[in-house]
Image (spheres, helix red, strand yellow):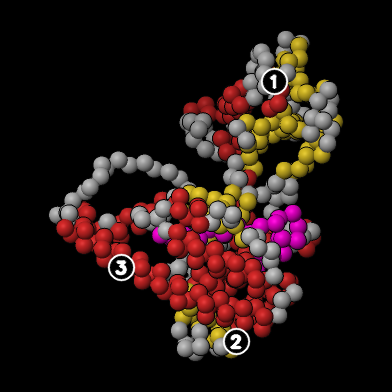
Amino acid sequence: MTERITIAGLAIDRRLHDFVEAGILSGIGLGADAFWGGFAEILRELRPRNAALLAGCDELQVELDAWRRAHPGRSEPQDEQAEPQVVVPVGDAGLVVDAVNARWGSLYAAVYDSDVVPDEGATARGGSFNPARGARVVALGRDLLDAAAPLKHGSHAGATGYAVHDGRLMVALAERCRVGLLDADAFVGYRGEPDAPSAVLMRHQGLHIEIVLDRDDPVGAIDRAGVRDLVLESAVTTIVDLEESFATVGAADKVLAYSVLRGLFQDATGPAEQRATPFSRLSPDREYTAPDGSALRLPGRSLVLVRHVGIHMHTDAVLDGYGRAIPAGLLDALVATAAAVPSLRGTERSVYVIRPQQHGSEEADFTIELFRRVESVLGLPERTIKVGVMGEERRADVGADRAAAADRIAFIDTGFLGRSGGEIRSSDLAARP
């Protein structure tokens, strides 16, 4: 039988209670009575609205099914369009760290280890480094530099060195001349000494490319310009998922999810020696010197957006005064946000949350009211919690959702799995004769 602790009329699974007490509240200066008392008030006020919204969804589905029965067959062309979306399941801490670190990645490693270069014949990977394959990787990298940061004349393929003079990037070519970039503003920083930098930073379409220079490295030693690697800014945001790719239902699931978030948000801001494995692998921010000589600091990690459970799911991790399971999204809103509070003491000033499967502005209003109450319980400034809107449901109006959450909106997207499921459920009868 599940052991429970009763606080403020709530019967809380001991595993969840003990984790919140020792793992979260001890670090944010909030007592258990205030925390769970605040949640009891949120539950009392918002549970009826949660139920009413679900009832409204059911009523609209009945009407939609009735219309489909009266008008069978497809009512729109069968055009298809595929769009990718990357999320990381919260249940694997190592995978979460890899995803958050994916903001910056080696182009050379990615191309060498993939089939961008054919894995056959002279360019086959084999059991050790293949110079012919490596040369193809380097050539592709130079092509990228020519496309993203072209020179005034010549090509990066002919470069024999990179240096900074009077705040401008100068590239030495084999023809014994130095040239600048066609767009001088594409150069945004460097690391090391101006006349022999260890890295050169450029920006293209809002994202950065770092040329890593090291003639003592085995790769850099055989490159005429001493280029060891090209590091690309890639995954600017990461969705840490409690809803779709990792099911968080019972107390054990919730404690696992919240503990990963606690480690991510606490250890991302603390000194490396105080971090717990695997969060010790979180990448630090990247530091450069700007062309004018000032310090330039760029985020080393993706911006984390936490996807909560929507209004549909319930959990018995906490039971209300009548012994009923509670809406899981309400619990996620409070505990997952509490886990992120330590990050607000550093450079972050917001917590980014994705609320899935919202059907329209009424549910968006409900989300905003929930966030206001969570901020009140945790003593956070109003609008600390920012919201991501997912156009997953057939009758979702992203414009209406955006208007309802205008002062909190941070992210708009269509989750293809959620939208596919929503289409199947909403229009199931459309495919029937």
Q: Mark 2 — residue? A: 8
Say which element carries label 1. Answer: loop
Along the viewing direction, whichever of 86 and 28 lies nearer the viewer: 28
Q: Give the side of residue 81 with respect to residue 100, left or right.
A: left
From the viewer's perspective, tell me whether residue 292 is left or right of residue 388. Answer: right
Of 318 and 105, the residue lying toward us: 318
Amino acid type of the residue tagged 2 in the rendering = Ala
The location of residue 203, given as percent across then percent down, is 66, 32
| Crowding at mark 3 (Cα within 10 Å: few <14, some 14-19, many 20+) | few
Query: Does residue 183 appear anywhere in the picture?
Result: yes
Q: Where residue 255 sits in the image (x, y, percent)? A: 58, 73
Q: Marks 3/1: CA distance?
A: 61 Å
Q: From mark 3 to mark 2, how far is it between C-alphas?
A: 34 Å
Identify which residue is drawn at 56% across, 76% down.
42
**N-term mark: 3 or 1:** 3
Of the two numbered discs 3 and 2 on the same chain, state the one appearing first in sequence: 2
Question: Does the CB distance between marks 3 and 1 fall below 8 Å?
Answer: no
Point out the stretch of residues depicted in magenta. Answer: 338-359
Amino acid type, residue under disc 3 in the picture: Glu
Q: Disc 1 to disc 2, how far (Cα)?
A: 65 Å
Image location of residue 290, percent across then percent down: 79, 34
Q: Which of disc 2 and disc 1 is earlier in sequence? A: 2
Quadrant of the image for the C terminus?
bottom left
Residue 98: mark: none
Please check the rendered image and state whether residue 324 is part of the magenta-colored stretch, yes or no. Answer: no
Q: Which mark is residue 181?
A: 1
**Secondary element type, mark 3:** helix
Of the residues shown, which amino acid type is indicated by label 1? Leu
Residue 59: image tag: 3
